Amino acid sequence: MEKRPFVTLEQLEKITESFPTPFHLYDEKGIIENAKRVQEAFSWNPGFKEYFAVKATPNPVLMGILKDCGFGMDCSSATELMLSDAVGFSGHDIMFSSNDTPPEEFKMADDMGAIINLDDFTHIECVEQVLGHIPETISCRFNPGGVFEISNGIMDNPGDAKYGMTEAQIFEAFRILKEKGAKRFGIHAFLVSNTVTNDYYPMLAGELFELAVRLEKETGAKVAFVNLSGGVGVPYRPEQKANDIYAIGEGVRKEYERILVPAGMGDVAIYTEMGRFILAPYGCLVTKAIHEKHTYKEYIGVDACAVNLMRPAMYGAYHHITVMGKENAPCDHKYDVVGSLCENNDKFAVDRMLPKIDKGDLLVIHDTGAHGFSMGYNYNGKLRSAELLLKEDGSVQLIRRAETPQDYFATLDVCENMKKYL
Ligand SMILES: *Cc1c(COP(=O)(O)O)cnc(C)c1O
């Protein structure tokens, strides 16, 4: 699939008059259209709800757009709960899917009426202690162990993952929770990340639906929902084929009809916690070429660095790059596109064939709308960039200002000599 930016050079030149690079830019129109597709794809299931994984893009304006699309929020920490509360989410519109959870965060989630998804068997006792009760609605995270293999070689190793309960533990958990007053149960699993295939959700659903039938039969606990969590991927590379969310929804429906309906469980709600699929393609990192360097390799130095987008440095992840205004120029130059960190892995691209880049060129780094800005950090004293929203009407809204040195120094006010910078 050819990868085109959702913004033109002309638009970007105008935006950069008011907002200096680097910044993350989000596409409101694309976000809303995609959210509608997700809702449609699962509309066969009356209880369906997507809980957007806040960690992917924790910006209240974007969370508000998703709220208007009917989504809930999936949180994993106190600050994510606070953000969701501030945007107006409450009660069962919040899923609290955390792990290694600080006990007081269970309390905070419960006070907000959120659904608590227990990562571990021992958390039953922890929750009971800190809340003084077991919530009537409760979910347990399942880890089948071993290897989970989907089509065309896509696989992962749940057996090596820190998340979730074993099968024996989840049966025991359901029995104990029921005894302690839980009435509506959910099961959750996240087995493979960034799956670029339409088969992941349907396969996972098949496993979880069968588990749900056995759990209900053997423990008498009422399974109210199955949470397929995240993991639906996006085509970061041009040669990859995008997932078809309609095919995914239909695949899950088939498993539902095959397994749950005949078991008399046709009232189970499907929940999802997608982050990447919801926003990744609808955000990009806009950066400017500020240096070129010719040594043993050809380097283009840009004004963004790995603190603005960690995935290439952290996972060796591919992010497509468009040199704005040179979309149709031949890709006849081989570059490393680098940032300014004192770390040799601070490279947005290695040996990438691109059009000839000149100083001042604007580069769009694609698919940074999820797990982009949010993974940012402050190494080398680098500051977090702004986040901008390209609205449906073509205007641009600053939805997070860039950090200033004052922000960076804000926690250092213990030091007298720092005061002049605050
Ligand atoms: C990270 C995460 C998600 C979202 O994952 P994506 O890959 O962005 O879809 C959902 N649920 C949980 C519990 C997570 O940790």
Image: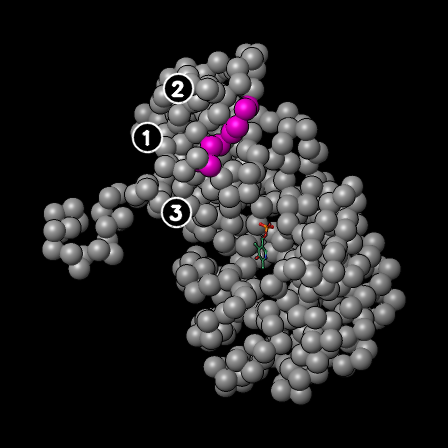
Report the front residue among 363 and 401. 363
Check if residue 102 falls in the magenta segment: no
User: What's the magenta region?
Assistant: 345-352
| Mark 1 nearby-residue class (10 Å; few <14, some 14–19, many ≥20) | some
In the drawing, does residue 405 fall left or right of residue 279? left
Tag 2's secondary structure?
A: strand
Q: Residues within 10 Å of mark 3 (few under 14, many from 20)?
A: some
Residue 202 in percent (x, y) is at 77, 53
- The kind of residue tagged 3 is Tyr
* Circle nearer the N terminus (1, 2): 1
Pinpoint residue 339: horizontal percent, then vertical percent.
40, 32
For the residue pair 121 and 80, the one nearer the viewer reads as 121
Mark 2 vs ligand 1: CB below 8 Å: no
Task: Indicate the quadrant of ligand 1 in the picture.
Answer: bottom right
Secondary structure beneath dot 1 equals loop
Q: Position of residue 370 (x, y in %)?
A: 52, 44
Q: Does 342 sit left or right of 319 as displayed?
A: left
Q: Classify 18 as above or below 312.
A: above
Q: Which residue is mark 3?
A: 377
Pick the residue in front: 116 or 118: 118
- Which residue corresponds to mark 2? 293
Above or below, 210 against 390 in this view is below
Give the distance between the C-alpha atoms of the residues marked 2 and 3, in whole angstroms.
Answer: 26 Å
Residue in the picture at 77% in, 51% down: 149
Residue type, mark 1 in image = Pro
Q: Which residue is mark 1?
A: 20
